[in-house]
Image: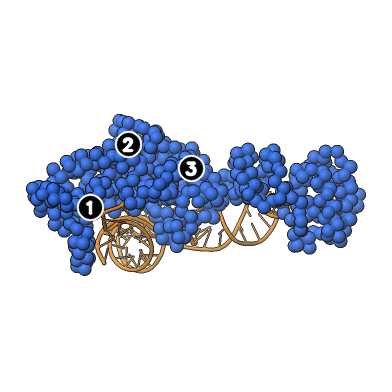
Amino acid sequence: MSRDTVRVRFAPSPTGYLHVGGLRTALYNYLFAKKNGGAFVLRIEDTDRSRYVEGAVENLIDALRWAGLDYDEGPGKEGGVGPYLQSERLEIYNERVAQLIEDGKAYRCFCTPERLDEVRKKAQAEGGQPKYDKHCLALSEEEANAKLDAGEQCVVRLNVPEGETISFEDRVRGTVSFSSDTLDDQVLIKSDGYPTYHLANVVDDRLMGITHVIRGEEWLSSTPKHVLLYQYLGWDVPEFAHLPLLLNPDRSKLSKRQGDVAVEDYRAKGYLPEALVNFVALLGWTAGDDREFYELEELVEAFTLERVNKAGAVFNVEKLDWLNEEHLKKQSPEALLPAVRAAYEASDIKNKSASDDYLVKIIPLMLERVTFPSEIATTAPYFFDAPTEYDEKGVKKRWKDDAAENTRALADAYEKLDAPTKDDYERVLREVAEKKDLGAGRFIHPARLAATGVPGGPGLFDVLELLGKGEVVARLRAAAERLG
RNA sequence: GGCGCAUUCGUCUAGUGGUUUAGGACGCUGGCCUCUCACGCCGGUAACACGGGUUCGAAUCCCGUAUGCGCUACCA
């Protein structure tokens, strides 16, 4: 790893599913890596054993793969700086912490949760920052060892200096500074021996050669602690870029209570990965031009950290829907077939004998009329079942007094045709209309009602051709009978 | 409460001191196209949080206020 090779990471904790905010963070990391010829690393932050969810890692990887964000290194893809699961790196953290303790930059703390609580309450009552009072910093090595030998539980804390200003450059926010007096003596190693995020993330980022830390804004406030750790460990700090948060419509942080937040939810609803990726890319970033539609490769080309916004962005589903429609139109019928078939099989359409070939022919006709692939078959059941009822408003508007007679005449004419194409259907209809000295509309609208039961949809002659002569004639006759 | 970050149409955003009657997109909406619906095209709707400065001139710079969000755990 040379020092100027860009290396970034996405470091989720395996709590069950990939959050759309996480997807956006992963995406920006991915884009930045690809744009700069760097590596995109996936690291699993599983240091909280109480929150571990079975199968969550597989889930995360699956969601990333679905979105098209392949990682260069990570679980199952060794890159020489693994393992990529923090739970497998415990010795590494312990080594570094031993060094910190030796240097007086960290210390063991034996305080009970009860005492911690008191200290915190007292500090808060006095109107100050609730933080640890460094009580155990005074312990000598002998005293600490004695407590350890006696079997007392302990944590390791960061020894934060007083009266210092800690600042760092953020690629999206500029210079950010904090007074060290507002920083708590952060726990580095928990009493169960696992590291906290703060320690593990600094050590791993360094050891994995991460050059740019691109993560959510929720980490901005703890970054000074990380900066301090880099200094204490004698390391240069990486570049930081804190991304604005994704918000609910009421501008609170995007949460489960106000809608779907998991990538798999959107996947299940039928959103295309291309659309979701395009959408979240635009939540907090623009190229500066008026472009809205992007494929992943085009995002790679256009992306820069400098153009990431500072303010949070509301996750606005209407625009996602529009982008889904746009991306849908770019899909080939063959690519859409599996989703269309699945929705068709699951629908309450009675005729389930449609071939792949037939479904593929329907797709282009319906593509511009739906938001989701699943709607292609289900919004047009007439491609499978003959209508059992006719749209009331449509009938009122289009089924005039002469409709039954005209429709029968049309059926008679069609019956004589041999394997008619859409052009044949149209030609004959216009001939019949002309013979009766009527506008084509007097035939087209009733024929649509008869064939589909609804007043809207694809071009009539496209529909008729797909239905086939026998079915068309039968439906025309049935409607003439039913509607009179 | 403390600390930090943010604040342009309902939403996503362009805008980095004059080119701005603040531009685009989604949504909503009027019209055109058309066998219908949809697509497409043309048009409309709607914003610089507030108050002070700095400046010949501010959405753009500074200060304050308000509001929102984040952090404030042996969670990440």
Vertical arrangement, residue B30 with respect to residue A1, above or below: below
Chain depicted in blue: A
Q: Secondary structure at mark 3?
A: helix
For label 3, the residue is A67
Residue at 33% from the left image edge and 51% from the top image edge: A50
Residue hosting label 2: A83
Q: Chain of mark 2?
A: A
Helix, strand or loop status at disc 1: loop
Does the image show residue A408? yes
Is mark 2 in CB contact (under 8 Å) with mark 3? no
Place of residue A401 in the rendered image (x, y in percent of width and height, measured from the top left): 86, 61
Q: Residue at x 27, y 37 (%)?
A: A207
User: Could you tell me which residue is drawn at 28 percent across and 39 percent down?
Assistant: A89
Q: Earlier in the sequence, mark 3 or mark 1?
A: 3
Question: Disc 1 marks which amino acid?
Answer: Gln
Tell me the quarter of the picture where residue B69 sits.
bottom left
Q: Quadrant of the N terminus of chain A?
A: top left
Tag 2: amino acid = Pro
- A77 lies left or right of A230: right
Q: Crowding at label 1, few (<14), some or many (≥20) Cα neighbours within 10 Å?
A: many
* The label number, if any, that marks residue A186 in the structure image: 1
* Mark pair 3, 1: CA separation: 36 Å
Residues A383 and A32: in front is A383
| Subunit under mark 1 | A
Q: What residue is drawn where x is 22% and y is 39%?
A: A235
